[in-house]
Amino acid sequence: MAEQDGERARIIEAAYRVLAASEGESVAVGEILAEAGLSTRAFYRHFESKDDLVIAMFRRDNERVMAEIHAMVAAAESPDDALRRFVEGTMRLASDRRRRRRVMVMTSAQAVRARGYAAERARSQAAQESVLALVLEQGRDAGLFPWARAPKADARSICAVLWHVFGEQIAGGGSAGADEAAAQVVDFALRALGAPPADAGLPVPEAAGKRTARV
């Protein structure tokens, strides 16, 4: 069992290296196996096709990211701190060199063309939105996010902004660094949710709580 797990990991890591070096050119299973030093039989012990391999790579990375996000949110001292950790944890994928390369592989044209990729990505995004929606709901109930009238829809909107900024960072087209970009997204989200300024130390005015959510 351990030997088979090792084979699977070798194939996945080899696939990352080959796909990263392909510069957009199509990659064959044989190239991945040559990099891994394994046989075709070894490949088909673990994967039905190259598409199946790509989906397995996506799922493995997503499981790691979601575990980190859950841990960061659980360690937060308050809903606004949880929101900040959620955004910063996501943007950290763009600032860490190794993980940025992996994201680029998993968002490359070859990966996107894999059968089942769109559905897998949709499930991943829904899972992230669900975590943030719970944070917004807790913040609303605590009186910190008075404009979070529809946490699920608000989470979807905030995530859309976050993923857009994240995409700019991955593509290298963002005007700000990852940390600054994360701070901008957090600032936008907190203002949109009606949270009091960080330095105010005061409850949100009653009038603010009567306004319609703008996220």
Image: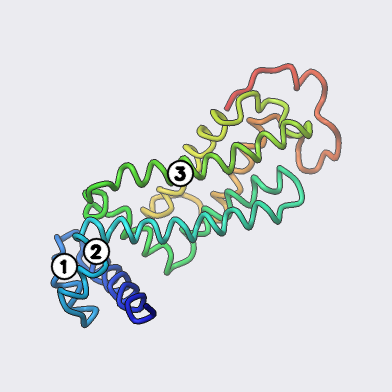
Q: Secondary structure at mark 1?
A: helix
Q: Nearer the viewer, residue 134 or 182?
A: 134
Q: Is residue 174 left or right of residue 56?
A: right
Residue at 79% across, 18% down: 207
Q: Any mark on residue 47, and which?
A: 2
Colouring used for the render: rainbow
Q: Are marks 1 and 2 in contact (CB under 8 Å)?
A: no
User: Looking at the figure, which quarter contains the N terminus?
Assistant: bottom left
User: Looking at the figure, which quarter contains the C terminus?
Assistant: top right
Residue 15 placement: quadrant: bottom left
Which mark lies nearer to you, 1 or 2?
2
Which residue is labeled 1 in the image? 29
Q: Position of residue 148 (x, y in %)?
A: 65, 28
Q: Position of residue 5 (x, y in %)?
A: 36, 75
Residue 105 placement: quadrant: bottom left
The amino acid on which the numbered mark 2 sits, given as a three-letter code, is Phe
Q: Is residue 145 left or right of residue 40?
A: right
Disc 1 to disc 2, C-alpha distance: 11 Å
Residue at 29% across, 48% down: 117
Q: Any mark on residue 81, and which?
A: none
Which residue is labeled 3 in the image? 163
The amino acid on which the numbered mark 1 sits, given as a three-letter code, is Val
Placement of 125 over or under 98, stated as above or below = above
Q: Position of residue 3 (x, y in %)?
A: 34, 81
Q: Is residue 209 left or right of residue 213?
A: right
Placement of 36 over or under 84, stated as above or below = below
Q: Residues within 10 Å of mark 2 (few under 14, many from 20)?
A: some
Residue at 59% across, 36% down: 133
Q: Secondary structure at mark 3?
A: helix
